[in-house]
Image: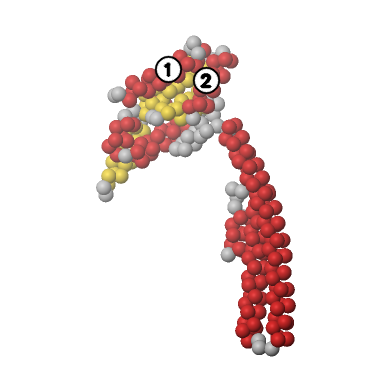
Amino acid sequence: MEESIQKAVEHNPVLAPELQRALSAAVQTAAGFCSAASHCVQRLGQIEQQIEEAFAIDGVRVLRFRLLESLQGLREETQHRHVQMSEMLVELREQLEIAQGVRSAASSVAPALDPLTSLETRERAEHAMAAAIERGVPAYAVLFVVDRLHLFNARYGYATGDQILRRVHRHLGSSLSQEDRLFRWTGPAFMAILEGIEGAEVKAEVSRITSVKLEAAVQIGNGSVMLPIACTSLLLPLAQTAGLAELTQRIDAFIGEQARH
């Protein structure tokens, strides 16, 4: 069992190398302690059996000497292993604290990703919009809202809604240029940020994207149906906004209005 634990620790890609070494050492120390304890128990059992078989005084004296020797060895081995285990536990605690600190630092720096699409989420979209507003360059935020998603969720289940969102994500990702940035805003909405493009060109681009007819296959009983998917868009020139707060209010109000249709 110790070997299987050792291999699991050494081949676990989630653990840091330092933590792997500390865990491996702890496993080896614990295995050594168990082995030494088993050996001492076996020796004591042999002595106990000899005591039951002994009748002569000299035999008892010899057994008494062996018993004291075994007890002394067990005491020393136990103390030695106790020190080793204590040191291993201290090192493990330190490595865990380091690992937790690194994970916390990474989570505070790395952008949160939407679990469904792996896109950056609303918070990062707001940062990108604020940066574009501050630069003052020609830039547009384009909101794409999946039509009737709440109705699809209610009738066919959230798994169907997730399938529709993934389908829209693939379409938007393949339709936008490499310079454009795409985010998962919230609920049925995606946000794209386009820079270095003029107003008429942006409108034509958005019209082209939303005019494509999309479908998603939904399993119903033994058959399936194709659900039509459509998106409603909202074009927001970032250079003409009073600030991020006003912008997000307009976006959320638009999403709320679409949800009532």
Q: Residue at x 65, y 86 (%)?
A: 54
| Closer to the camera in the image, 196 or 98 | 98
Describe residue 46's horizontal placement relative to residue 198 as left or right: right
Q: Nearer the viewer, mark 1 or mark 2?
A: 1
The quarter of the picture where residue 142 lies is top left
Q: Is residue 167 visible?
A: no
Q: Residues within 10 Å of mark 1 (few under 14, many from 20)?
A: few
Q: Residue at x 38, y 39 (%)?
A: 163
Image coordinates for residue 84, horizontal then vertical, percent: 70, 57
Q: Quadrant of the C terminus?
A: top left
Number of numbered discs on residues: 2
Q: Which residue is mark 2?
A: 129
Q: Amino acid at mark 2?
A: Met
Q: Residue at x 69, y 83 (%)?
A: 60
| Closer to the camera in the image, 214 or 113 | 113
Q: Residue at x 67, y 56 (%)?
A: 85
Q: Is residue 55 visible?
A: yes
Q: Which residue is mark 1?
A: 249
Image coordinates for residue 115, horizontal then vertical, percent: 47, 38
Q: Secondary structure beneath disc 1?
A: helix
Between the C-alphas of marks 1 and 2, the distance is 13 Å
Q: Secondary structure beneath disc 2?
A: helix
| Closer to the camera in the image, 85 or 178 | 85
The quarter of the picture where residue 215 lies is top left
> Looking at the image, which residue sits at the far bottom?
56
Q: What scheme was used to colour the molecule?
A: secondary structure
Image coordinates for residue 260, horizontal then vertical, percent: 30, 23
56 above or below 116? below
11 above or below 193? below
Q: Amino acid at mark 1?
A: Gln
Q: Quadrant of the N terminus?
A: bottom right
